[in-house]
Amino acid sequence: MLEVNGINNRKGRLDIGLTQATLDGTSYLVAMRPVPALHAAVVAYVAERDVYGKIDAYSGWIAELAIVAVVIVLFFSYWIYRIIHQPLALLVKSFRHAEKGQLVPIGSTSRHDEFGYLYKQYNRTIEKLDELIHQVYEQKLRAQASELKQLQSQINPHFLYNTYFTLYRLAMIEDNESVARFSSYLGEYFHYITRHPDDAVPLRLEVKHTQTYAEIQRFRFDDRITTFWDPVPDDAAELVVPKLILQPIIENAYKHGLENKLTGGGLRIRFRHDAAAATLAIAIEDNGSVVSLQDAAGWTLPLHARDEAAEGTGLRNVHRRLQLMYGETSGITLAVSEEFGGLQVMLTIRYGKKEQP
């Protein structure tokens, strides 16, 4: 007997479409159409296995094709990664290293495609940049040495005359103890100037030399000018600085600010070291002629000038040598001293940005 499922009777009428039936354990698809005039229905049925059997036979093939398609997609993805993405990522990584100043050539240049050409051209560019950087650095070192020699030649004759006149005066009054101490200071001074082989020295040696210079000037000015020194920070004592960066500034203070003071002249040297920021600031202040902000701003301009006429000044020389050694953010700035009312010369050394060859 055929058991029919899904027959609905709406308002006494047969409204039957496609449904499913079971006969002797076999499933059939049944299509029925009602015949109202005969109060009957026309029924047609077919076994499900005859309809779906062939479709089931293809399901295995479909699964196999899907697996093959996934394998092909994975293969092409890996192929694209090896052929395009991986070499491109290596090139981008090399450019990022170059941006940080790490001029490292790409080792893998055996490729014969477009990336191989790019690798070779990149390596040639890196080699040329490295060569140019070394040339520029050597030129800076030569310029630094030249400026140091120029500064020494400026200092020696001018200072030599004054010291010998001072020594002559002490000898004439037969102050033998002062002559001995003054001669000792002169020996230390000229030994540092003429015999020290390095163009850069630890900060403690530069400070010691400048203190010797201040002691010599104290003899010359008969204690009319007092110099106050803050202690050098312990963690900055071995910081390497260009030779002769403090003396020209103190000499400038004596010559232009304090020389005409008959009494009460004052000069102070302060140190401020920020190890976290890798910055050292040295302030040199005097109580010479009263300085206005406008004057300080006007004196600052020659420090940044590029003309040859500005090269001869001691401040300009120190400013340029600091920049040569530690970069453009280091150097000298001028301002009015809040404590003394005279000129404040601030040396800033940002050694965290120190240029490397």
Image (tube, rainbow, N blue to C red):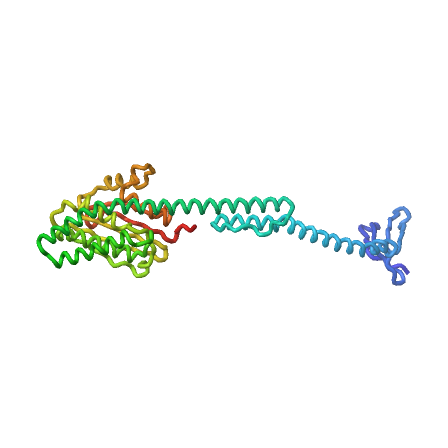
Residue 172 placed where, x, y %?
9, 52
Query: Which residue of the protein is positioned furthest toward the left in this rendering?
Result: 173
The residue lying furthest to the bottom in this view is: 25
Q: Is residue 285 left or right of residue 322?
A: left
User: Is residue 72 at least partly visible in the picture?
Assistant: yes
Q: Position of residue 239 (x, y in %)?
A: 33, 57
Identify whether 103 is placed above or below 23: above
Nearer to us in this view, 303 or 166: 166
Locate the N terminus and report the quarter of the image it occupies.
bottom right
Residue 40 in sight in this render? no
Identified at 24% across, 46% down, the residue is: 155
- Toward the viewer: 72 or 7? 72
**Residue at 32% from the left image edge and 38% from the top image edge:** 305
Q: Is residue 308 above or below residue 271?
A: above
Residue name at image x 21 percent, y 53 percent: 213
Q: Residue at x 75, y 54 (%)?
A: 68
Taking 135 as reference, is 6 left or right? right
How many dots with numbers?
Answer: 0
Q: Position of residue 31 (x, y in %)?
A: 86, 51
Q: Nearer the viewer, residue 270 or 111?
A: 111
- Where residue 173 appears, as percent x and y from the top left, is 8, 53
